[in-house]
Amino acid sequence: MCDSFCVALIPAYEPDNLLLDLLCDLRTAGVKTIVVDDGSGPAYAEVFRQAKEFATVLGYANNQGKGHALKYGFNYINEHIHGRYVVVTMDADGQHRVVDAEKVCDLAEQHAGTLVLGSRKQGEGSPLRSRFGNFVTRKVYSLSTGRTVYDTQTGLRAFDAKLLPFLLQVPGERYEYEMNVLLAAVREGIAIEEVSISTIYLEDNRRSHFSAVRDSWRVYKEILKFSAVSLISCCVDYLAYTLLLLISGDQLAFANIGARFISASLNFSLNRKYIFKSEGRLWQSALQYFVLAIFILFSNTVVLSLLVNGGVNEYIAKLITEIMFFSMSWLVQRFVIFRKKRPLGKYKTSVL
């Protein structure tokens, strides 16, 4: 399959015999496999006992979420597996085939430092909630980053060992983690590639533990709350811009700079306290935010002037520039200014 060897990581919560079938296929293909029991409980002890015949089984007593299970496994791999290898994450519910895992592994080996996604095509045969969920996350991701990823919800992902430290620092303990990885990858300049794989949904995807309401809120909440604060700040900025423009006699630069100072101060305070809940040093985050605000202000003013000089109405031009710089502002604040670092000791592992 690959010149380097492949390590499969499977987070499992209340699995059935489909997990054992997958493990058997992986062993036949010569893939070293790590399974993380995400607090499934005593009722599933027999499944994991049998899983030990095919894989290394890790775990803990209480359910912590898919993101936690993945990082728990990443930490084990980072500490205990050596050599040149590619990691592939797979779901335990029978949605992923070994042949598709081999495809993403091959591409990850060929493109070091790249996050490779197994992308499913959503057609009429796919469950409605899966089609709708993927459509929404795809659009949210595109609006937030300016990038397009067709299948943002896929659990089949491959990458080389160099990305493990990055993946261990991405926040999120449950289903939001996988979306956060895609967002953080853009900020870190990590390339993302997609490979077409089989689309498999068993029993209309009823086996999935994903809660449409609870877990969707976890995935989208920061972006939605950030958008709300940005909208408030944008309204304040636009109002101040209009007033300063009238007061100054159409002095475009003065009105834009003054409005930006007022709205940026409000935006920083709200984001630090209510959105990202940063516990870092105030002066440090304020300085970083100030640098970001200056950069956006300069770029915003240049683009605004170009649009106005190009014949665009000055009020419409203002709206266009705000939309353009929204995504960049969210990414920098989320993953740089108000970044929360997780100590690796949190994912100290033990073999069951």
Image (cartoon, rainbow, N blue to C red):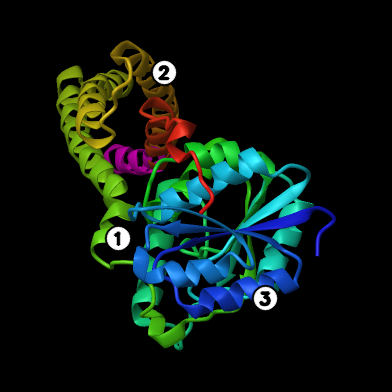
Sort mark 1 into few (<14), some (14-19) or many (20+) by Cα contacts within 10 Å. some
Query: From which residue to which does the magenta span run?
Result: 310-326
Residue at x 68% of width, y 63% of height: 104
Label of residue 216 in the image: 1
The amino acid at mark 1 is: Ser
Q: Secondary structure at mark 2?
A: helix
Q: Please, is residue 102 above or below residue 219 in the view?
A: below
- Give the side of residue 19 with respect to residue 221, left or right: right
Residue 324, image x, y percentages = 40, 42
Where is residue 136? Give x, y as percent.
Answer: 36, 64
Residue 260, image x, y percentages: 27, 24
Judged by depth in the image, the label closer to the viewer, 2 or 3, is 3
**Are the residues at dot 2 and dot 3 in contact (C-beta closer than 8 Å)?**
no
Q: Depth check: give the residue in front, 146 or 98.
A: 98
Residue 314: say if magenta: yes
The residue indicated by pointer 2 is 291
The secondary structure that dominates the magenta segment is helix
Task: Tell me how far mark 1 sits from mark 2, CA to CA.
Answer: 33 Å
Would residue 133 appear left or right of 75 to someone viewing this image?
left
Q: Residues within 10 Å of mark 2 (few under 14, many from 20)?
A: few
Residue for badge 3: 25
Q: Nearer the viewer, residue 314 or 123?
A: 123
Compare marks 2 and 3 and give the one earlier in the sequence. Answer: 3
For the residues labelled 1 and 3, the Cα–Cα distance comes to 32 Å
